[in-house]
Amino acid sequence: MKNNRTYLLLVAFAAALLPVMILRDFTPSNELRYLSIADEALRDGHLFAFFNHGVPYADKPPLYLWLVMLGRQLFGGHCMAFLSLFSLVPAMVILRTMDRWAAESGVTVRNRTTAALILMTSGLFLGLAVFVRMDMLMCMFITLALRSFWLLYAGRGNAKLHRWLFPLFTWLALFTKGPVGLLVPLLSVAVFLILSGQGRTTGRYCGWFTWGVIAAGCAVWFTLAWLEGGMDYLNNLLFHQTFDRAVDAFHHKEPVWYYFISIWYSLAPWSLLVIGGIVVALCRRVRLDESERFFLTVILTTGVMLSLFSSKLAVYLAPTFPFLVYLAASLLQRMPAAAWWQKGAVALPAVVWAAALPTVLLLRHRVESVVPDGAEWLLAAGALTCSGVAALVLLCRDDSLHRAVGSVAAGVLVAVFTLGFSLPELNVRLGYGTLCREAKQLLQANGWSNCYVWNIRRAESMDVYLGRPVEETSVEELCAGRCDDGVVMLPGRKLQSDARLRNFVSDRRCHEVGEYLIVELPPAMPAGSW
């Protein structure tokens, strides 16, 4: 029965995300870029040295790009549902692993259920569970590595097996996204042993055997990357993407206190309950058991380490979220029942949820562009409002905190499931798939070969849809007639601020696709039409 509870939660989680996995378009920022890099690697026959339109791309290790390449080979194209599995399944493995870990540490079934609901409906964790990124896969390997260490440390399970699994999972975390996957497990373990007065035993877990396994995997990887990409690529991989990012980042440079701010919206809507629970317990000097001390060590060690790095993003802190949530759940059962601050921490999102339907109705009538027409939005808002009201009613009763959390979490999952069906209409705003498919049809129908873009962010990755490269152009080149027969894609909103562009577009056939325009450039296009 206990196992059924866990599996039912995981099934509900997967079901809520299923429409998003099937109906969503790839986002231009990172997802489409990964697909474009994988396509280029397949064309060029590369497996270890990757390039983004001819420019070396050593930002990410090969594992995740291999999975993208595998999907392309299996389906003949990039399948969103297939690629989303490499985010969803790792999220489910993390939930299952943490549930078993907490059960062994004496956390009650009710508190573990609450922890699972909180984790799966936390903003960043929920997003990472469906977006085509390698972050959740890395988090899974980090969690499994720390779990293997703990079983080895506690003398549970097969010692020989976990002696191998700890370095193997650590290396896989490194091979998925980079140095953070290596540093989080090894530093957390070392700091925990030192603080526990067992610093002399560090070599037993992080000694020659562990480093030997990791070094062997890295030696093969680096050698093959050098053979394919040369010394410049290897230097980029080993130094530019590690030391340069850590010391003086060329991307995502943020101040040292960045994570003290980002964690509040990353864990929303449960930030106050999770962080507040841990802080209150520490202030009251609640005695932590050994597993709780280990969880706290992972959280603080990772937070301090990432804060010292120059390059920062909210997503980098994701490996700590399972430990934050389950530590809070473990401490919650030793706190006074239904403390006022706990009810307040749940009441806050419940009030926001309760206001969802009135807000949507108000915005729908006043600002049509904010809330698109469609029953999905009303149903999702209605689900949130019902769950919020139910949570507020439950909070008025004694010993109802867990049920209130469940009500708020259920509203999130139902809303995500319902809103997933509105994605076909929203994809034209979220990605470039619809735009590129129409442009490709125009090119094929007219026998044209050139595809230009102007002022579209990261347009180079459109080659995933078009099957051909796009060429950046300018208003001057367009108006001077220096673009050959084909089409040009541009943002329609720019017409209001550029008279030359308006004149250029007014003389040609245009096709409106969401916020963009596709302008035909026939062979007989007159030069200097403005």
Image: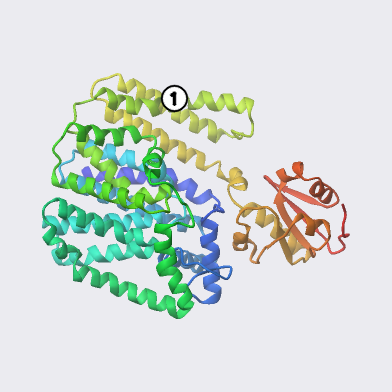
Is 409 positioned to the left or the right of 510 in the image? left
**Quarter of the image where one finds residue 354:** top left
| Relative depth, front residue between 426 and 247 | 247
Whether 485 is drawn above or below 8: the answer is below
Can you give x and y, in whole percent of width and height, for residue 114 in the image? 28, 36
User: Residue beneath label 1, please?
Assistant: 354
Question: At 25% across and 50% down in the image, what residue appears?
Answer: 298
81 sits left or right of 221 in the view? right
Q: Looking at the image, which residue is at 27% across and 31% down?
A: 402
Q: Residue at x 50, y 67 (%)?
A: 57
Instruction: Determine if residue 78 is in view.
Output: no
Point out residue 518 in the picture as x, y percentages from the top left corner.
Answer: 74, 53
Q: Please state which amino acid type lies under the numbered disc 1.
A: Ala
In the figure, 244 relative to 404: above or below?
Answer: below
Image point (41%, 33%), residue name: 411
Q: Is residue 178 above or below residue 213?
A: above
Specify the farthest residue to the top: 396
Residue 288's x, y, as percent?
15, 41
Residue 464 visible in image: yes
Q: Horizontal and vertical percent for residue 34?
A: 51, 61
Near-viewer residue (221 or 116): 221
Instruction: Report the quarter where the N terminus lies.
Output: top left
Identify the element where label 1 is drawn. Answer: helix
Q: Could you tell whether 431 is left or right of 445 in the image?
A: left
Colour convention: rainbow
Residue most extreme to the front? 248
Within-10-Å neighbours for mark 1: few <14, some 14–19, many 20+: many
Number of numbered callouts drawn: 1
Q: Nearer the viewer, residue 319 or 361?
A: 319
